[in-house]
Amino acid sequence: MQKRESLAKSTFKYLLASFFVWCFPLGAIIYNAIIGEDIIQLNILLGFITGVIINIMWDYLQIYRQKKEYHKYYL
């Protein structure tokens, strides 16, 4: 039971950490399903690439903030 809970918790943390990667393609799939077009199109790929770029930028921003906080308390 403990293993299953930790697996669910780690999966949830992973999905939140990579939110921008999976949210844009999922949004494009839902949008295409609503308007009745083919579900997989070029905008899925563009959404995935955009999500990856935003996620990388977000990671670098977090690293920069952590370094800034470290230096603030270090000095």
Image (cartoon, rainbow, N blue to C red):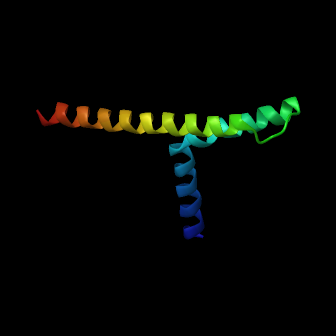
Please give left or right for residue 44 compared with residue 62 in the image: right
Q: Residue furthest right?
A: 36
Q: Nearer the viewer, residue 9 or 21?
A: 21
What residue is at 53 percent from the left and 62 percent from the top? 6
| Residue under the point 37% across and 33% down | 61
Picture quadrant of residue 56: top left
Q: Position of residue 38 (x, y in %)?
A: 84, 39
Percent across and percent down for residue 2 are 55, 68
The structure residue drawn at horizontal position 18% and vertical position 34%, both measured from the top left corner, is 71
**Closer-to-camera residue (68/36):** 36
Quadrant of the rendered image containing residue 1: bottom right
User: In the drawing, does residue 39 fall left or right of residue 54?
Assistant: right
Figure disc tally? 0
Front-most of residues 46 and 26: 46
Residue 12: x and y in percent read 57, 51
Residue 40 is situated, as x and y percent measured from the top left of the image, at 77, 42
The single residue placed furthest to the front in the displayed view is 42
For the point 57% across and 41% down, the residue is 21
Quarter of the image for residue 37 reads top right
Q: Quadrant of the C terminus?
A: top left
